[in-house]
Image (tube, helix red, strand yellow):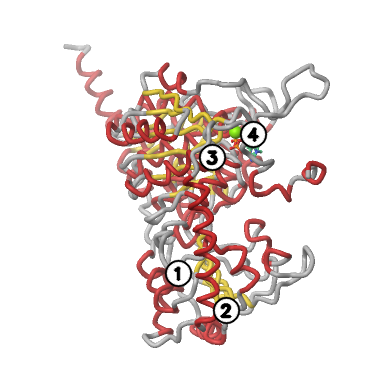
Amino acid sequence: MGTVEPQIAAADAKAQTADGFKLVIDALKLNGIDTIYGLPGIPITDLTRRAQAEGLRVLAFRHEQNAGYAASIAGFLTQKPGICLTVSAPGFLNGLNALAHATVNCFPMILISGSSEREIVDLQQGDYEEMDQLAIAKPVAKAAFRVLHAEDIGVGIARAIRAAVSGRPGGVYLDLPAKLFAQSIDAELGKKTLIKVVDAAPKQIPAPEAVKRALDLLRSAKKPLIILGKGAAYAQCDTEIRALIEKTGIPYLPMSMAKGLLPDTHEQCASAARSFVLPGADVVMLVGARLNWLLSHGKGKTWGGKAAKDWGGQKFIQIDISPQEADSNVRIDAPVVGDIGSCVSALLSGIGSNFAKPPSEWLNAVSEKKNANIAKMGETLAKNPSPMNFHSALNVVRDIVKANPDAMFVNEGANALDFARSIVDMYKPRKRIDVGTWGIMGVGMGYCVAAAVVGKGPVIAVEGDSAFGFSGMEVETICRYNLPVCIVIMNNNGVYKGTDKDPTGRDPAPTVFVKGARYDKLMEAFGGVGVNASTPAELRKAMEEAIRSGKPTLINAVIDETAGTESGRITSLNPTAGKKK
Ligand SMILES: Cc1ncc(C[n+]2csc(CCOP(=O)(O)OP(=O)(O)O)c2C)c(N)n1
Ligand SMILES: [Mg+2]
Protein backbone atom coordinates (compact mmCIF):
# COMPACT_ATOMS: atom_id res chain seq x y z
CA MET A 1 0.00 0.00 0.00
CA GLY A 2 2.79 2.31 0.94
CA THR A 3 4.30 2.04 -2.58
CA VAL A 4 1.11 2.65 -4.58
CA GLU A 5 0.28 6.10 -3.31
CA PRO A 6 3.52 7.82 -4.30
CA GLN A 7 3.13 6.33 -7.77
CA ILE A 8 -0.32 7.81 -8.16
CA ALA A 9 0.94 11.11 -6.86
CA ALA A 10 3.77 11.08 -9.40
CA ALA A 11 1.38 10.24 -12.25
CA ASP A 12 -0.93 13.08 -11.16
CA ALA A 13 1.92 15.52 -11.10
CA LYS A 14 3.01 14.38 -14.57
CA ALA A 15 -0.48 14.82 -15.97
CA GLN A 16 -0.46 18.36 -14.69
CA THR A 17 2.70 19.35 -16.50
CA ALA A 18 3.41 19.70 -20.18
CA ASP A 19 6.86 19.20 -21.64
CA GLY A 20 8.41 20.88 -24.67
CA PHE A 21 7.44 18.03 -26.99
CA LYS A 22 3.80 18.34 -26.05
CA LEU A 23 3.72 22.10 -26.35
CA VAL A 24 5.24 22.00 -29.85
CA ILE A 25 2.72 19.39 -30.98
CA ASP A 26 -0.20 21.21 -29.40
CA ALA A 27 0.87 24.53 -30.90
CA LEU A 28 1.05 22.99 -34.39
CA LYS A 29 -2.31 21.27 -34.00
CA LEU A 30 -3.94 24.40 -32.65
CA ASN A 31 -2.95 26.08 -35.90
CA GLY A 32 -4.40 23.43 -38.15
CA ILE A 33 -1.11 21.81 -39.06
CA ASP A 34 -1.72 18.12 -39.61
CA THR A 35 1.38 16.83 -41.41
CA ILE A 36 5.11 16.75 -40.69
CA TYR A 37 7.71 15.80 -43.31
CA GLY A 38 10.92 14.79 -41.61
CA LEU A 39 13.60 12.37 -40.54
CA PRO A 40 14.11 11.30 -36.90
CA GLY A 41 17.22 11.35 -34.72
CA ILE A 42 18.60 13.24 -31.71
CA PRO A 43 16.93 15.37 -30.37
CA ILE A 44 13.65 15.08 -32.26
CA THR A 45 13.00 11.32 -32.39
CA ASP A 46 10.41 11.50 -29.66
CA LEU A 47 8.83 14.51 -31.29
CA THR A 48 8.15 12.41 -34.42
CA ARG A 49 6.77 9.54 -32.29
CA ARG A 50 4.60 11.69 -30.10
CA ALA A 51 3.33 13.77 -33.00
CA GLN A 52 2.22 10.55 -34.68
CA ALA A 53 0.61 9.33 -31.45
CA GLU A 54 -1.25 12.64 -31.20
CA GLY A 55 -2.77 12.16 -34.64
CA LEU A 56 -0.45 14.24 -36.81
CA ARG A 57 0.63 12.54 -40.02
CA VAL A 58 4.39 12.07 -39.82
CA LEU A 59 6.03 11.17 -43.12
CA ALA A 60 9.56 9.94 -42.60
CA PHE A 61 11.99 10.32 -45.48
CA ARG A 62 15.40 8.85 -46.33
CA HIS A 63 17.08 12.25 -46.68
CA GLU A 64 16.05 15.60 -45.16
CA GLN A 65 16.38 17.48 -48.43
CA ASN A 66 13.51 15.49 -49.86
CA ALA A 67 11.41 15.99 -46.75
CA GLY A 68 12.11 19.71 -47.11
CA TYR A 69 11.07 19.83 -50.74
CA ALA A 70 7.91 17.95 -49.81
CA ALA A 71 7.15 20.51 -47.09
CA SER A 72 7.83 23.42 -49.43
CA ILE A 73 5.45 22.22 -52.12
CA ALA A 74 2.82 21.24 -49.56
CA GLY A 75 2.97 24.91 -48.55
CA PHE A 76 2.44 26.00 -52.14
CA LEU A 77 -0.49 23.66 -52.60
CA THR A 78 -2.29 24.38 -49.33
CA GLN A 79 -1.34 27.97 -48.32
CA LYS A 80 -0.45 26.49 -44.93
CA PRO A 81 3.23 26.31 -44.00
CA GLY A 82 4.69 22.91 -44.84
CA ILE A 83 6.64 21.58 -41.86
CA CYS A 84 10.03 19.91 -42.29
CA LEU A 85 11.52 18.41 -39.13
CA THR A 86 15.22 17.54 -38.88
CA VAL A 87 17.96 16.72 -36.42
CA SER A 88 20.79 19.13 -35.68
CA ALA A 89 23.80 20.16 -37.81
CA PRO A 90 23.96 17.64 -40.70
CA GLY A 91 20.21 17.03 -40.79
CA PHE A 92 19.61 20.77 -40.56
CA LEU A 93 22.04 21.42 -43.42
CA ASN A 94 20.34 18.76 -45.53
CA GLY A 95 17.06 20.59 -44.99
CA LEU A 96 18.57 24.00 -45.63
CA ASN A 97 18.57 23.63 -49.41
CA ALA A 98 14.82 23.18 -49.33
CA LEU A 99 14.44 26.16 -47.00
CA ALA A 100 16.29 28.36 -49.48
CA HIS A 101 14.23 26.88 -52.30
CA ALA A 102 11.03 27.78 -50.43
CA THR A 103 12.19 31.35 -49.89
CA VAL A 104 13.25 31.83 -53.51
CA ASN A 105 10.01 30.34 -54.81
CA CYS A 106 7.81 32.16 -52.25
CA PHE A 107 6.44 28.93 -50.76
CA PRO A 108 5.42 28.96 -47.10
CA MET A 109 7.48 26.43 -45.20
CA ILE A 110 8.91 26.05 -41.71
CA LEU A 111 12.11 24.12 -41.19
CA ILE A 112 12.12 22.98 -37.56
CA SER A 113 15.48 21.61 -36.49
CA GLY A 114 16.63 20.34 -33.16
CA SER A 115 19.95 21.83 -32.06
CA SER A 116 22.67 21.19 -29.53
CA GLU A 117 23.30 22.90 -26.22
CA ARG A 118 23.53 26.65 -26.62
CA GLU A 119 26.15 27.15 -23.92
CA ILE A 120 28.47 24.66 -25.59
CA VAL A 121 27.73 25.77 -29.14
CA ASP A 122 28.34 29.41 -28.30
CA LEU A 123 31.65 28.67 -26.60
CA GLN A 124 32.51 26.28 -29.43
CA GLN A 125 33.38 23.54 -27.01
CA GLY A 126 32.68 20.74 -29.43
CA ASP A 127 29.19 19.47 -28.63
CA TYR A 128 27.51 16.59 -30.43
CA GLU A 129 26.52 18.05 -33.82
CA GLU A 130 27.59 21.52 -32.80
CA MET A 131 26.53 24.29 -35.12
CA ASP A 132 25.15 27.82 -34.87
CA GLN A 133 22.16 26.86 -37.00
CA LEU A 134 20.21 30.07 -36.51
CA ALA A 135 23.00 32.18 -37.96
CA ILE A 136 23.40 29.86 -40.91
CA ALA A 137 19.69 29.76 -41.70
CA LYS A 138 19.15 33.52 -41.61
CA PRO A 139 20.52 34.47 -45.03
CA VAL A 140 18.34 31.95 -46.87
CA ALA A 141 15.20 32.26 -44.78
CA LYS A 142 12.48 34.88 -44.82
CA ALA A 143 12.71 34.80 -41.01
CA ALA A 144 14.49 32.72 -38.36
CA PHE A 145 13.67 32.23 -34.68
CA ARG A 146 14.96 30.27 -31.71
CA VAL A 147 12.97 29.22 -28.65
CA LEU A 148 14.82 28.68 -25.37
CA HIS A 149 11.98 28.33 -22.88
CA ALA A 150 8.95 26.07 -22.93
CA GLU A 151 6.63 28.99 -22.21
CA ASP A 152 7.80 30.67 -25.43
CA ILE A 153 6.96 27.75 -27.72
CA GLY A 154 3.51 29.15 -28.48
CA VAL A 155 4.96 32.51 -29.51
CA GLY A 156 7.75 30.86 -31.52
CA ILE A 157 5.37 28.76 -33.57
CA ALA A 158 2.93 31.63 -34.05
CA ARG A 159 5.70 33.90 -35.30
CA ALA A 160 7.00 31.21 -37.62
CA ILE A 161 3.54 30.62 -39.12
CA ARG A 162 2.88 34.32 -39.65
CA ALA A 163 6.26 34.90 -41.21
CA ALA A 164 5.84 31.94 -43.55
CA VAL A 165 2.41 32.79 -44.96
CA SER A 166 1.87 36.54 -44.65
CA GLY A 167 2.80 38.98 -47.39
CA ARG A 168 5.12 37.25 -49.83
CA PRO A 169 5.37 33.73 -48.43
CA GLY A 170 8.74 32.11 -47.78
CA GLY A 171 10.85 29.69 -45.81
CA VAL A 172 11.12 30.18 -42.05
CA TYR A 173 13.61 28.54 -39.73
CA LEU A 174 12.68 27.54 -36.18
CA ASP A 175 15.53 26.42 -33.93
CA LEU A 176 14.56 24.17 -31.03
CA PRO A 177 17.49 23.24 -28.77
CA ALA A 178 17.46 19.75 -27.25
CA LYS A 179 17.02 21.07 -23.71
CA LEU A 180 13.74 22.72 -24.62
CA PHE A 181 11.95 19.44 -25.22
CA ALA A 182 12.56 18.14 -21.72
CA GLN A 183 11.46 21.33 -19.98
CA SER A 184 8.17 20.91 -18.17
CA ILE A 185 5.76 23.61 -17.16
CA ASP A 186 2.35 23.52 -15.55
CA ALA A 187 -0.07 22.08 -18.13
CA GLU A 188 -2.76 24.73 -17.62
CA LEU A 189 -0.20 27.51 -17.81
CA GLY A 190 1.33 25.88 -20.87
CA LYS A 191 -2.02 25.76 -22.63
CA LYS A 192 -2.47 29.48 -22.04
CA THR A 193 0.86 30.26 -23.68
CA LEU A 194 -0.21 28.73 -26.99
CA ILE A 195 -1.40 31.07 -29.71
CA LYS A 196 -3.94 30.31 -32.39
CA VAL A 197 -2.88 32.66 -35.12
CA VAL A 198 -5.73 34.90 -36.26
CA ASP A 199 -5.75 35.88 -39.95
CA ALA A 200 -2.25 34.59 -40.68
CA ALA A 201 -2.16 35.94 -44.24
CA PRO A 202 -4.19 39.14 -44.08
CA LYS A 203 -5.69 40.47 -47.27
CA GLN A 204 -3.82 43.38 -48.75
CA ILE A 205 -6.20 45.59 -50.69
CA PRO A 206 -4.67 47.55 -53.57
CA ALA A 207 -5.01 51.33 -53.67
CA PRO A 208 -7.87 52.48 -55.95
CA GLU A 209 -5.56 54.89 -57.81
CA ALA A 210 -3.12 52.06 -58.57
CA VAL A 211 -5.98 49.99 -59.96
CA LYS A 212 -7.18 52.91 -62.09
CA ARG A 213 -3.67 53.56 -63.41
CA ALA A 214 -3.39 49.91 -64.42
CA LEU A 215 -6.78 49.84 -66.12
CA ASP A 216 -6.10 53.06 -68.02
CA LEU A 217 -2.89 51.55 -69.36
CA LEU A 218 -4.59 48.29 -70.23
CA ARG A 219 -7.36 50.13 -72.08
CA SER A 220 -4.80 52.07 -74.12
CA ALA A 221 -3.12 48.87 -75.35
CA LYS A 222 -3.25 47.76 -78.95
CA LYS A 223 -1.42 44.50 -78.32
CA PRO A 224 -1.97 43.54 -74.70
CA LEU A 225 -0.71 40.40 -73.04
CA ILE A 226 -1.28 38.90 -69.58
CA ILE A 227 1.37 36.72 -67.94
CA LEU A 228 0.28 34.43 -65.10
CA GLY A 229 2.98 33.39 -62.65
CA LYS A 230 3.00 30.80 -59.91
CA GLY A 231 2.01 33.55 -57.47
CA ALA A 232 -1.30 33.65 -59.33
CA ALA A 233 -1.61 29.89 -58.91
CA TYR A 234 -0.70 30.11 -55.21
CA ALA A 235 -3.40 32.72 -54.57
CA GLN A 236 -6.26 30.26 -55.17
CA CYS A 237 -8.49 32.86 -56.81
CA ASP A 238 -8.92 30.75 -59.92
CA THR A 239 -12.46 31.91 -60.77
CA GLU A 240 -11.52 35.58 -60.60
CA ILE A 241 -8.41 35.08 -62.73
CA ARG A 242 -10.39 33.22 -65.34
CA ALA A 243 -13.02 35.99 -65.33
CA LEU A 244 -10.32 38.64 -65.78
CA ILE A 245 -8.82 36.82 -68.75
CA GLU A 246 -12.16 36.12 -70.38
CA LYS A 247 -13.74 39.53 -69.76
CA THR A 248 -10.77 41.36 -71.21
CA GLY A 249 -10.28 38.90 -74.08
CA ILE A 250 -6.51 39.42 -73.74
CA PRO A 251 -4.15 36.60 -74.78
CA TYR A 252 -2.29 35.14 -71.82
CA LEU A 253 0.87 33.17 -71.15
CA PRO A 254 1.04 30.88 -68.13
CA MET A 255 4.43 30.44 -66.51
CA SER A 256 5.30 26.82 -65.88
CA MET A 257 3.52 26.31 -62.55
CA ALA A 258 0.60 28.53 -63.60
CA LYS A 259 -0.24 26.12 -66.40
CA GLY A 260 -3.77 24.84 -65.92
CA LEU A 261 -5.01 27.95 -64.05
CA LEU A 262 -7.12 28.06 -67.19
CA PRO A 263 -6.93 24.91 -69.34
CA ASP A 264 -3.90 25.07 -71.63
CA THR A 265 -6.35 24.40 -74.48
CA HIS A 266 -8.16 27.70 -73.77
CA GLU A 267 -8.50 29.76 -76.94
CA GLN A 268 -6.79 32.77 -75.34
CA CYS A 269 -3.77 30.72 -74.23
CA ALA A 270 -0.77 31.99 -76.18
CA SER A 271 1.81 29.43 -74.97
CA ALA A 272 2.35 28.08 -78.47
CA ALA A 273 3.04 31.62 -79.71
CA ARG A 274 5.35 32.69 -76.86
CA SER A 275 8.17 33.92 -79.07
CA PHE A 276 5.64 35.99 -81.02
CA VAL A 277 3.66 37.58 -78.19
CA LEU A 278 6.60 38.60 -75.97
CA PRO A 279 8.31 40.86 -78.52
CA GLY A 280 4.97 41.81 -80.11
CA ALA A 281 3.03 43.01 -77.06
CA ASP A 282 2.80 46.71 -76.21
CA VAL A 283 1.31 46.42 -72.70
CA VAL A 284 2.03 43.44 -70.50
CA MET A 285 0.20 42.71 -67.28
CA LEU A 286 2.14 40.48 -64.90
CA VAL A 287 -0.02 38.62 -62.39
CA GLY A 288 2.10 37.07 -59.64
CA ALA A 289 4.99 36.67 -62.08
CA ARG A 290 8.42 38.18 -61.56
CA LEU A 291 10.56 39.58 -64.37
CA ASN A 292 13.46 37.29 -63.48
CA TRP A 293 15.59 35.16 -65.80
CA LEU A 294 12.61 32.99 -66.67
CA LEU A 295 11.17 36.02 -68.47
CA SER A 296 14.56 37.21 -69.73
CA HIS A 297 14.41 40.08 -67.20
CA GLY A 298 11.75 41.82 -69.30
CA LYS A 299 14.25 42.97 -71.89
CA GLY A 300 16.59 41.90 -74.65
CA LYS A 301 15.88 40.00 -77.83
CA THR A 302 13.12 37.86 -76.29
CA TRP A 303 11.17 41.09 -75.84
CA GLY A 304 12.08 42.56 -79.21
CA GLY A 305 15.00 44.64 -77.91
CA LYS A 306 17.83 45.20 -80.40
CA ALA A 307 20.57 43.85 -78.15
CA ALA A 308 20.79 41.57 -75.13
CA LYS A 309 19.88 44.22 -72.56
CA ASP A 310 17.75 46.57 -74.63
CA TRP A 311 14.23 47.47 -73.65
CA GLY A 312 11.68 46.07 -76.07
CA GLY A 313 9.34 49.04 -75.70
CA GLN A 314 6.66 47.28 -73.63
CA LYS A 315 4.84 49.00 -70.80
CA PHE A 316 4.26 46.88 -67.76
CA ILE A 317 1.51 46.50 -65.20
CA GLN A 318 2.66 44.36 -62.31
CA ILE A 319 0.35 42.79 -59.77
CA ASP A 320 2.40 41.58 -56.82
CA ILE A 321 2.10 41.35 -53.08
CA SER A 322 5.56 42.77 -52.59
CA PRO A 323 6.00 46.53 -53.19
CA GLN A 324 9.71 45.92 -53.76
CA GLU A 325 9.15 43.79 -56.81
CA ALA A 326 8.35 46.66 -59.19
CA ASP A 327 11.29 48.07 -61.20
CA SER A 328 13.46 45.07 -60.35
CA ASN A 329 14.54 44.78 -63.97
CA VAL A 330 12.67 47.29 -66.12
CA ARG A 331 10.35 50.19 -65.43
CA ILE A 332 6.94 49.17 -64.16
CA ASP A 333 4.47 51.80 -65.33
CA ALA A 334 1.58 50.58 -63.22
CA PRO A 335 2.44 48.61 -60.10
CA VAL A 336 -0.58 47.19 -58.30
CA VAL A 337 0.43 46.08 -54.84
CA GLY A 338 -1.75 43.72 -52.87
CA ASP A 339 -2.66 40.09 -52.60
CA ILE A 340 -3.47 38.63 -56.01
CA GLY A 341 -7.08 37.81 -55.09
CA SER A 342 -7.86 41.35 -53.92
CA CYS A 343 -6.04 42.92 -56.87
CA VAL A 344 -7.75 40.78 -59.48
CA SER A 345 -11.15 41.43 -57.86
CA ALA A 346 -10.48 45.17 -57.86
CA LEU A 347 -9.49 45.08 -61.54
CA LEU A 348 -12.60 43.07 -62.34
CA SER A 349 -14.90 45.59 -60.72
CA GLY A 350 -13.08 48.41 -62.48
CA ILE A 351 -13.47 46.68 -65.82
CA GLY A 352 -17.22 46.22 -65.46
CA SER A 353 -19.02 44.43 -68.24
CA ASN A 354 -18.08 46.45 -71.29
CA PHE A 355 -14.30 46.18 -71.61
CA ALA A 356 -13.39 46.59 -75.27
CA LYS A 357 -11.67 43.44 -76.55
CA PRO A 358 -8.17 43.93 -77.97
CA PRO A 359 -7.97 44.86 -81.67
CA SER A 360 -8.71 41.90 -83.90
CA GLU A 361 -5.44 42.33 -85.88
CA TRP A 362 -3.54 41.41 -82.71
CA LEU A 363 -5.82 38.53 -81.75
CA ASN A 364 -5.77 37.13 -85.28
CA ALA A 365 -2.01 37.39 -85.56
CA VAL A 366 -1.59 35.58 -82.25
CA SER A 367 -3.95 32.76 -83.14
CA GLU A 368 -2.45 32.37 -86.60
CA LYS A 369 0.99 31.94 -85.10
CA LYS A 370 -0.29 29.66 -82.37
CA ASN A 371 -2.23 27.41 -84.74
CA ALA A 372 0.74 27.08 -87.08
CA ASN A 373 2.99 26.05 -84.18
CA ILE A 374 0.42 23.64 -82.79
CA ALA A 375 0.06 22.02 -86.23
CA LYS A 376 3.84 21.70 -86.50
CA MET A 377 4.03 20.14 -83.04
CA GLY A 378 1.18 17.78 -83.99
CA GLU A 379 3.23 16.45 -86.89
CA THR A 380 6.25 15.84 -84.66
CA LEU A 381 4.14 14.12 -82.02
CA ALA A 382 2.54 11.83 -84.58
CA LYS A 383 5.90 10.33 -85.55
CA ASN A 384 6.87 7.01 -84.06
CA PRO A 385 10.65 6.77 -84.26
CA SER A 386 12.65 3.86 -82.99
CA PRO A 387 14.21 4.21 -80.48
CA MET A 388 11.55 6.28 -78.75
CA ASN A 389 12.37 9.99 -78.35
CA PHE A 390 11.11 12.68 -75.97
CA HIS A 391 8.26 13.61 -78.29
CA SER A 392 6.85 10.16 -78.88
CA ALA A 393 7.09 9.29 -75.17
CA LEU A 394 5.59 12.59 -74.02
CA ASN A 395 2.78 12.26 -76.53
CA VAL A 396 1.65 9.31 -74.42
CA VAL A 397 2.02 11.26 -71.17
CA ARG A 398 0.01 14.08 -72.75
CA ASP A 399 -2.90 11.70 -73.44
CA ILE A 400 -2.76 10.19 -69.96
CA VAL A 401 -2.81 13.62 -68.29
CA LYS A 402 -5.68 14.68 -70.53
CA ALA A 403 -7.64 11.60 -69.44
CA ASN A 404 -6.74 12.26 -65.76
CA PRO A 405 -6.90 16.04 -65.35
CA ASP A 406 -7.01 15.77 -61.56
CA ALA A 407 -3.67 13.96 -61.40
CA MET A 408 -0.78 15.94 -59.96
CA PHE A 409 2.07 16.29 -62.43
CA VAL A 410 5.64 16.47 -61.14
CA ASN A 411 8.39 17.35 -63.61
CA GLU A 412 12.17 17.80 -63.48
CA GLY A 413 15.17 17.36 -65.77
CA ALA A 414 16.47 19.48 -68.64
CA ASN A 415 15.01 18.12 -71.89
CA ALA A 416 12.63 15.98 -69.85
CA LEU A 417 11.39 19.22 -68.29
CA ASP A 418 11.33 21.53 -71.28
CA PHE A 419 9.64 19.12 -73.64
CA ALA A 420 7.07 18.04 -71.05
CA ARG A 421 6.26 21.65 -70.24
CA SER A 422 5.42 22.44 -73.84
CA ILE A 423 3.87 19.08 -74.85
CA VAL A 424 1.81 18.09 -71.80
CA ASP A 425 -1.26 20.31 -71.45
CA MET A 426 -2.63 20.98 -67.98
CA TYR A 427 -6.33 21.40 -67.35
CA LYS A 428 -6.69 22.37 -63.71
CA PRO A 429 -4.96 24.83 -61.37
CA ARG A 430 -1.93 23.82 -59.25
CA LYS A 431 -1.55 20.40 -60.84
CA ARG A 432 1.87 21.04 -62.37
CA ILE A 433 4.77 21.31 -59.91
CA ASP A 434 8.33 21.48 -61.11
CA VAL A 435 11.89 22.79 -60.72
CA GLY A 436 10.71 26.36 -60.03
CA THR A 437 12.74 29.54 -59.92
CA TRP A 438 16.15 27.93 -59.60
CA GLY A 439 15.66 25.16 -62.14
CA ILE A 440 16.68 22.89 -59.32
CA MET A 441 17.20 19.13 -59.66
CA GLY A 442 16.15 16.93 -56.76
CA VAL A 443 12.62 18.08 -55.99
CA GLY A 444 11.05 15.08 -57.75
CA MET A 445 10.38 12.39 -55.17
CA GLY A 446 9.73 14.81 -52.30
CA TYR A 447 7.16 16.56 -54.48
CA CYS A 448 5.60 13.19 -55.34
CA VAL A 449 5.10 12.33 -51.69
CA ALA A 450 3.59 15.72 -50.82
CA ALA A 451 1.44 15.75 -53.96
CA ALA A 452 0.03 12.34 -53.08
CA VAL A 453 -0.59 13.31 -49.46
CA VAL A 454 -2.07 16.75 -50.15
CA GLY A 455 -3.71 16.10 -53.51
CA LYS A 456 -5.26 12.81 -52.53
CA GLY A 457 -5.31 11.68 -56.19
CA PRO A 458 -2.86 10.02 -58.54
CA VAL A 459 0.55 11.57 -59.12
CA ILE A 460 2.46 11.35 -62.39
CA ALA A 461 6.13 12.31 -62.38
CA VAL A 462 8.16 12.83 -65.54
CA GLU A 463 11.81 12.72 -64.54
CA GLY A 464 15.08 13.03 -66.40
CA ASP A 465 17.33 10.11 -65.48
CA SER A 466 19.80 12.54 -63.91
CA ALA A 467 17.09 14.51 -62.12
CA PHE A 468 15.62 11.33 -60.63
CA GLY A 469 18.98 10.33 -59.17
CA PHE A 470 18.97 13.28 -56.77
CA SER A 471 16.04 11.88 -54.78
CA GLY A 472 15.71 8.33 -56.14
CA MET A 473 16.02 6.60 -52.76
CA GLU A 474 12.65 8.03 -51.80
CA VAL A 475 11.00 5.38 -53.96
CA GLU A 476 11.22 3.35 -50.75
CA THR A 477 9.24 6.09 -48.99
CA ILE A 478 6.67 6.05 -51.79
CA CYS A 479 6.34 2.27 -51.46
CA ARG A 480 6.32 2.36 -47.65
CA TYR A 481 3.33 4.70 -47.59
CA ASN A 482 1.85 2.95 -50.63
CA LEU A 483 1.29 6.22 -52.48
CA PRO A 484 -0.40 6.32 -55.90
CA VAL A 485 2.67 7.62 -57.71
CA CYS A 486 3.61 6.75 -61.29
CA ILE A 487 7.19 7.78 -62.05
CA VAL A 488 8.25 7.88 -65.69
CA ILE A 489 12.01 8.15 -66.18
CA MET A 490 13.04 9.60 -69.51
CA ASN A 491 16.16 7.49 -69.66
CA ASN A 492 18.55 8.89 -72.26
CA ASN A 493 21.62 7.58 -70.41
CA GLY A 494 22.73 10.89 -69.02
CA VAL A 495 22.61 14.59 -68.33
CA TYR A 496 21.10 16.16 -71.49
CA LYS A 497 22.06 13.11 -73.57
CA GLY A 498 24.08 9.95 -73.28
CA THR A 499 26.60 10.27 -76.06
CA ASP A 500 29.49 12.28 -74.61
CA LYS A 501 32.94 10.67 -74.48
CA ASP A 502 36.02 11.34 -72.33
CA PRO A 503 38.50 12.61 -74.95
CA THR A 504 41.32 10.79 -73.14
CA GLY A 505 39.39 7.53 -73.20
CA ARG A 506 39.99 6.92 -69.47
CA ASP A 507 36.61 7.44 -67.81
CA PRO A 508 32.98 7.87 -68.72
CA ALA A 509 32.25 11.51 -69.66
CA PRO A 510 30.91 13.62 -66.75
CA THR A 511 27.48 13.81 -68.36
CA VAL A 512 26.86 10.11 -68.98
CA PHE A 513 25.60 7.24 -66.82
CA VAL A 514 25.59 3.46 -67.01
CA LYS A 515 24.12 2.61 -70.40
CA GLY A 516 20.78 0.88 -70.44
CA ALA A 517 20.29 1.29 -66.68
CA ARG A 518 17.11 -0.34 -65.35
CA TYR A 519 15.63 2.14 -62.90
CA ASP A 520 12.45 0.03 -62.81
CA LYS A 521 14.33 -2.58 -60.76
CA LEU A 522 14.79 -0.02 -57.97
CA MET A 523 11.05 0.14 -57.52
CA GLU A 524 10.72 -3.62 -57.48
CA ALA A 525 13.23 -3.80 -54.63
CA PHE A 526 10.64 -2.18 -52.35
CA GLY A 527 7.57 -4.01 -53.58
CA GLY A 528 6.42 -1.44 -56.14
CA VAL A 529 5.72 -2.11 -59.81
CA GLY A 530 8.65 -1.69 -62.22
CA VAL A 531 8.21 -1.61 -65.99
CA ASN A 532 10.77 -1.26 -68.76
CA ALA A 533 9.11 0.49 -71.72
CA SER A 534 10.88 0.86 -75.07
CA THR A 535 7.87 1.84 -77.18
CA PRO A 536 5.04 4.34 -76.77
CA ALA A 537 2.58 1.43 -76.68
CA GLU A 538 4.41 -0.17 -73.75
CA LEU A 539 4.59 3.17 -71.98
CA ARG A 540 0.88 3.81 -72.49
CA LYS A 541 -0.09 0.39 -71.18
CA ALA A 542 2.10 0.77 -68.08
CA MET A 543 0.85 4.28 -67.28
CA GLU A 544 -2.78 3.28 -67.68
CA GLU A 545 -2.24 0.31 -65.40
CA ALA A 546 -0.46 2.47 -62.82
CA ILE A 547 -3.31 4.97 -62.71
CA ARG A 548 -5.90 2.20 -62.58
CA SER A 549 -4.20 0.27 -59.78
CA GLY A 550 -2.89 3.24 -57.78
CA LYS A 551 0.20 1.16 -56.98
CA PRO A 552 3.61 2.81 -56.72
CA THR A 553 5.03 2.35 -60.21
CA LEU A 554 8.28 3.25 -61.91
CA ILE A 555 8.47 3.10 -65.68
CA ASN A 556 11.92 3.16 -67.23
CA ALA A 557 11.16 4.81 -70.59
CA VAL A 558 14.07 4.04 -72.90
CA ILE A 559 14.77 7.24 -74.84
CA ASP A 560 17.13 7.70 -77.78
CA GLU A 561 20.39 8.77 -76.12
CA THR A 562 21.11 11.22 -78.94
CA ALA A 563 17.76 12.99 -78.55
CA GLY A 564 18.46 15.78 -76.03
CA THR A 565 20.13 19.16 -76.38
CA GLU A 566 22.71 20.67 -74.01
CA SER A 567 20.87 22.36 -71.10
CA GLY A 568 17.51 21.79 -72.79
CA ARG A 569 15.98 25.17 -73.69
CA ILE A 570 18.49 27.28 -71.78
CA THR A 571 21.56 26.49 -73.85
CA SER A 572 22.22 30.23 -74.13
CA LEU A 573 22.99 30.43 -70.38
CA ASN A 574 25.70 27.80 -70.64
CA PRO A 575 29.11 29.48 -71.03
CA THR A 576 30.59 26.62 -73.04
CA ALA A 577 27.65 26.12 -75.32
CA GLY A 578 28.98 28.51 -77.96
CA LYS A 579 31.78 26.14 -78.81
CA LYS A 580 29.39 23.35 -79.56
CA LYS A 581 27.42 25.07 -82.28
C1 LIG B 1 20.80 20.79 -57.73
C2 LIG B 1 21.21 20.88 -59.16
N1 LIG B 1 22.37 20.36 -59.57
C3 LIG B 1 22.73 20.41 -60.87
C4 LIG B 1 21.95 21.04 -61.79
C5 LIG B 1 22.40 21.15 -63.23
N2 LIG B 1 21.49 20.39 -64.09
C6 LIG B 1 20.53 20.98 -64.82
S1 LIG B 1 19.59 19.89 -65.62
C7 LIG B 1 20.48 18.59 -65.03
C8 LIG B 1 20.13 17.18 -65.38
C9 LIG B 1 19.63 17.01 -66.78
O1 LIG B 1 19.62 15.66 -67.13
P1 LIG B 1 18.33 14.80 -67.04
O2 LIG B 1 17.62 15.03 -65.77
O3 LIG B 1 18.67 13.40 -67.35
O4 LIG B 1 17.42 15.46 -68.18
P2 LIG B 1 17.57 15.28 -69.77
O5 LIG B 1 17.96 16.59 -70.34
O6 LIG B 1 18.61 14.23 -70.02
O7 LIG B 1 16.21 14.86 -70.18
C10 LIG B 1 21.52 19.03 -64.22
C11 LIG B 1 22.47 18.13 -63.55
C12 LIG B 1 20.74 21.62 -61.31
N3 LIG B 1 19.90 22.27 -62.11
N4 LIG B 1 20.39 21.51 -60.01
MG1 LIG C 1 18.81 12.41 -69.14
Q: For the residue labelled by badge 4, is the local secondary structure a helix, a strand or a loop? A: loop
| Ligand 1 - quadrant of the structure image | top right
Q: In front: mark 3 or mark 1?
A: 3
* Label 3 CB sits under 8 Å from any ligand 1 atom: yes
What amino acid type should be assigned to the residue bearing mark 2? Lys
* Label 1 CB sits under 8 Å from any ligand 1 atom: no
Number of other residues with Cα within 10 Å of mark 4, as a class: few under 14, some 14 to 19, many 20 or more: some
State whether residue 391 is above or below residue 236. Answer: above
Q: Which mark is residue 223?
A: 2
What amino acid type should be assigned to the residue bearing mark 3? Phe
Disc 2 from disc 3: Cα separation? 34 Å
Q: Quadrant of residue 262?
A: bottom left
State whether residue 316 is above or below residue 403. Answer: below
Q: In front: mark 2 or mark 3?
A: 3
Q: For the residue labelled by badge 1, is the local secondary structure a helix, a strand or a loop? A: loop
Task: Tell me the residue that label 4 is attached to.
Answer: 562
